[in-house]
Amino acid sequence: MQYHSEKASPSTSEARTPGNVQARTGNTSVLPAFRKFANVRMNLIPYLYTEAKASSTTVCR
């Protein structure tokens, strides 16, 4: 999961971190939404690893 700006070195006001987006927009749902999807992603990692490992040892015909 990645959040970034088009610029190589964005200023503080241009950074797209969840905390900065919430501060700039005043939308208090930004951080809870980010946390939710960050947790979903982290919970999927063991499954993704297991499936990647299994697929790397499976012979395709």
Image: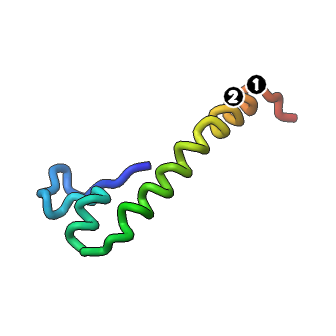
Q: Secondary structure at mark 2?
A: helix
**Image: 46 above or below 18:** above
Q: Residue at x 25, y 74 (%)?
A: 25
Nearer to me, 11 or 8? 11
Q: For the residues marked 1 and 2, what is the alpha-carbon distance in whole angstroms?
A: 7 Å
The residue type indicated by label 2 comes to: Lys
Q: Residue 32: give x, y in percent of width and height.
A: 41, 62
Q: Residue 4: give x, y in percent of width and height.
A: 30, 54
Q: Quadrant of residue 11?
A: bottom left
Nearer to me, 50 or 9? 50
Query: Which residue in the protein does label 2 denote?
Result: 53
Q: Residue at x 20, y 56 (%)?
A: 7
Q: Quadrant of residue 58?
A: top right
Q: Residue 43: give x, y in percent of width and height.
A: 58, 43
The residue type indicated by label 1 comes to: Thr
Q: Residue at x 39, y 50 (%)?
A: 2
Left-right relation of 29 to 9 = right
Q: Secondary structure at mark 1?
A: loop
Whether label 1 touches label 2, CB < 8 Å: yes
Query: Which residue in the protein does label 1 denote?
Result: 57
Left-right relation of 49 to 15 = right
